[in-house]
Amino acid sequence: MQSVDVVDNGRSIAAAIIQGSARAVSDGSFKNAMGTSASILFHSKATDPNRIISVNSVPGNREEQSAYRSELAGVSGSLSLISAVCTVHDIHTGSITIGLDGEQAMIAASEDWPLSPARPDYDLLTDIRAKVFRLPIKVHWKWIKGHQDDGASRDSLDEWAQANIYMDSMAKAYWNYLNETGHCPSPQRFEDENWSISFQDKKLSRVDKKPLYNAIMEPTSKAYWQRRGNMSASNISTIDWELIGKAFTNLTTAKKRRVTKHASGHFGCGKMMQIWKFQDHAECPRCPEPHEDPPHILNCPAPSATLRWEKALSAVKVWMTAHYTMPELTTAILRCLHEWRHPNPSRRSARAAISTRFGLRAAILEQDDIGWYNFLMGRLSIRWRDVQHRYYEWLQRRNTGKAWLQALIKKVWEVSWDMWDHRNEVRTTTITPAMIRETENLNEQIIEQFEEGEAGLGQKDHHFLDKPLAHVLGYDLDHKSQWLESIALARIWFANRHEVESPSIRHQREFMASWLSDGSGPP
Ligand SMILES: [Zn+2]
């Protein structure tokens, strides 16, 4: 808000709000990529001596300015003033009618259907709706026919139309003033906006996917993936981010979550489960590895994991064959993935032996550089699509390398999902080392209980030790901990029996019992 003119500290407007007769009218002005707005709060006429008038320059980047945005800015200005009056005069009931001549702006501001973040002026609309929602009073809306002064006598117009004409000229005057002073519109955060997105230090007035997508793939996020994926700065520029983005966009929300979690390492592998304190160890449920990190999900040496990996890779191979993938390319990729999972430097396939046809060897070398774990996370070299595209051309097929690569990225993601699913199946269906430890711990406690024997137990709890030790040791984990808890409680109860059975307590208990049974109150 740039400038406010108020006479009686809003006292008479406050009274009008409480009576339900207050009015607000706003209008906007827009020219040369710059917008202004003006708003007035009044009781009966725009010429009321105690009216409140304000003028604003419309926030936002130049290319986001419009006549519509100026209208909205006027509404936002009115709402700020109304909110200030309610706060200053401690108003909790009442109403105000807000009038404007922009019908679309009024509809968008007054309704409560969900707003798409992609629509223009998403930021202002969110701010307006939040302001309305937070006001302690009711808001009514009124559409005013604009420019009623054209041709008609001003005196014959109603107070709404007169206020509208007044605000129209105020907004224009303020525009001229700003224009002369060389003002440049700039974005700002609104008071009641829940969140906003800034790009290159400029707040965006809406979430337009294209610049946002570019922003996501731009330096900061690339630097993030660089740290996450152990890549060098030059690797980052050799990864096919464009097609990763496209492949990602086509996934279901659930799958999107899987991709980002796995790729960023923020998912429930042993390492994270320990960090998050969901478990006291970071062990792999499938093998003796004490420290299960995200790559281990894929290269766990457990035989069942290896089996699942081979199955997943043969699915990739089947897909590649079905999509006329260059055979040397298929072989090379599968071999490199195999070598990643079973590293053996002395038996590493010679890169010099790989065909240079269609740029295959260069692509392999570049992926070597980016890394094959990164390949499995979908971070494929930008060279792959060209290699395959040239091969399609040579085959005289109309397929494109682009579509092929986008689909390949999805196939590769499926490999890591398969491995993750397998890991979780094992964790929930088999006895893991952590479970074995817990079992041993419980068995020890059970043996101790049997060693202590009936000595510390009341007569009625001797039954806990009726069954032979071997029988109790055969219970499952839950049953064992339940048994231990019960017998421990019985021992505590027995140890404290004197307190429980003390005369005063017994007296109270007997008294309560008789009082409850005969219905008479205490003496
Ligand atoms: Zn493992």
Image: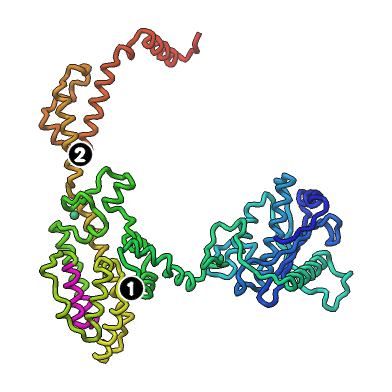
Q: Quadrant of residue 43?
A: bottom right
Which of 349/54 is in front?
A: 349
Across and down, in percent, residue 58 comes to 67, 67
Q: Is residue 104 visible?
A: no
Quadrant containing ligand 1: bottom left
Q: Residue at x 32, y 55 (%)?
A: 267
Between the residue at mark 1 and the residue at mark 2, the CA separation in whole angstroms equals 45 Å
Q: Quadrant of residue 340?
A: bottom left
User: Image check: 340 left or right of 26?
Assistant: left
**Disc ID at residue 108:** none
Amino acid type for the residue under numbered disc 1? Ile
User: Image check: 86 left or right of 195?
Assistant: right
Q: Look at mark 1 in the image and give the residue it sits on.
A: 239
Q: Look at mark 2 in the image and give the residue it sits on.
A: 438
Where does the magenta region start and end?
318-339
Point out the frontmost of discs 1 and 2: 1
Which of 395/213 is in front?
A: 213
Q: Is mark 1 within 8 Å of ligand 1?
A: no
Amino acid type for the residue under numbered disc 2? Glu
